[in-house]
Image (tube, rainbow, N blue to C red):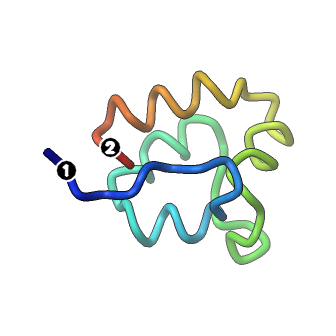
Amino acid sequence: MSTEAPIRPEMTVGAIAEQYPASAPVLARYGIDLCCGGTHSLEFAARAHGVDFAVLLAELEGAGVGR
């Protein structure tokens, strides 16, 4: 069982990228990057890119991120 904390909607993209390097390919697929220093929340970035947050979260978890 993993000891990683789950990803929460309010976590910043920068914190996720730093804490979970495996998130990079998933985020890149949706055009989510460290623009603005990665200070936007994952939920905000998903909404700004027209991505369903639940789908994004499921893909991140499928990549072994935040489980």
- For residue 10, above or below residue 64: below
Q: Is mark 1 on a helix, strand or loop?
A: loop
Q: Quadrant of residue 38?
A: bottom right
Which residue is under mark 2? 67
- The image's mark for residue 35 is none
Please state if 40 lies on the left or on the right of 62 as rendered: right
Residue pictured at 39% horizontal, 57% vertical? 5
Residue 19 in which image quadrant: bottom left
Q: Which of marks 2 and 1 is nearer the N terminus?
A: 1
Residue type at numbered disc 2: Arg
Closest to the observer, 3 or 56: 3
The outermost residue toward the right is 48
**Amino acid identity at mark 1:** Ser
Identify the residue at image location x=59%, y=50%. 8
Tell me the quarter of the image containing the C terminus.
top left
Residue 3 locus on image (x, y percent): 23, 58
Q: Can you say whether 16 is above or below 24 in the image?
A: below
Kindly report the distance in space between the C-alpha atoms of the residues bearing marks 2 and 1: 6 Å
| Residue 59 image position (x, y, % from top left) | 45, 29
The residue at which mark 1 appears reads as 2
Q: In this view, does 54 lie to the left or right of 44?
A: left
Instruction: Give the farthest residue toward the left.
Output: 1
Marks 2/1 in contact by CB < 8 Å: the verdict is yes
Query: Helix, strand or loop at disc 2?
Result: loop
- Determine whether 2 is above or below 47 in the image: below
Image position of 56 with respect to 48: above or below: above
Q: Position of residue 17 (x, y in %)?
A: 48, 64
Q: Is residue 44 left or right of residue 31?
A: right
How many marks are shown on the rendered structure? 2
